[in-house]
Amino acid sequence: MKKELDIFFTAIMFFTRIPCPKWIDHSPEILNKSTRYFSLVGIIVGGLAAFIFWVSLFIFPQTIALLFSMIFTIWLTGAFHEDGFADVCDGFGGGWTKDKILTIMKDSRLGTYGTVGLVGMLVFKFTGLHYQPHQLLITLIAGHSVSRFITSILLYLYPYVRDDITSKAKPMGHAQKFSIVVYNGVFGVIPLFFYNSYWVFLALIPTFIAMLLLGRFFKKWIGGQTGDCAGATQQVTEVVFYLSLLVLWKFI
């Protein structure tokens, strides 16, 4: 039980800014296993985002409440996944060889491709949420959990291609077991059961396809995935999930 708590709190510590007990183990083994709680962290982040949105609605209109919610999640995660998405845009936009792409992605400076891509992603995320006609609070939670579940499949399917131990994605630096996908699958789809219609499970199909297309693209250019690729996948599949729901609501 103590070891499992270590793994869970390590995931919280790595993927968010939420304070954790000082007694947790930070060993590489624990850090690698913490990926199993990726989707559960998504539920926590999404739940807090939904709470901020709900509280903000008492004072502000929905558009401003959504902005507060989005800004809060960016702060709560330290822009961890947004940074990965921006790095991927810069790397694949400005590099034409594996080494060049990896070098650019490792650079902490934000380039033109990253800036444009990040702005576009945030706009898509905001509008995708703003036009949700039903159960927005649940959608705020499900978007975070589902996208992290789908990203865990990317980590399982494709090899990690960086060999430096200083990478910000140490938990993704080793081969992931299928049990990691199972853990994340269980937690990832829990919010979907709270929708009024189980047809929402169909939204998993486009998100899965988007992950496969990204994985194929990463495999072609750099031979696998990195932590930045995982962050980009989380961001893209989150948006795809919101857009998929918009399409589903027109037919159910």
Image: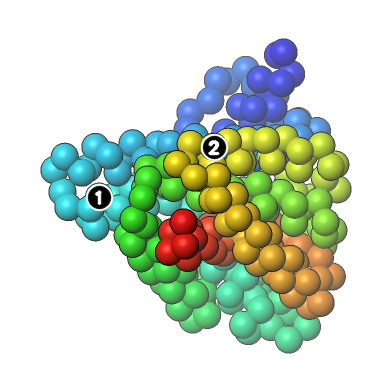
Q: Is residue 234 visible?
A: no
Q: In the rendering, at what x and y percent does residue 162 appear?
A: 80, 60
Q: In the rendering, at what x and y percent does residue 11 appear?
A: 63, 35
Q: Please state which of the two labelled residues, at mark 2 or mark 1, is closer to the viewer.
A: 2
Q: Nearer the viewer, residue 118 or 198?
A: 198
Residue in the picture at 53% in, 58% down: 241
In the image, residue 243 sits, relative to residue 168, either above or below, namely below
What residue is pinned by disc 2? 193
In this rendering, would 194 be left or right of 68? right
In the image, residue 18 sits, relative to residue 141, either above or below, namely above
Quarter containing the N terminus: top right
What residue is pinned by disc 1? 65
Q: Is residue 133 visible?
A: yes
Residue in the picture at 54% in, 68% down: 86
In this rendering, would 12 be left or right of 116? right
Q: In the rendering, at what x and y percent does residue 178 appear?
A: 84, 42
Query: Which amino acid lies under the numbered mark 1 shown in the image of this protein?
Result: Ala
Query: Which amino acid lies under the numbered mark 2 shown in the image of this protein?
Result: Phe
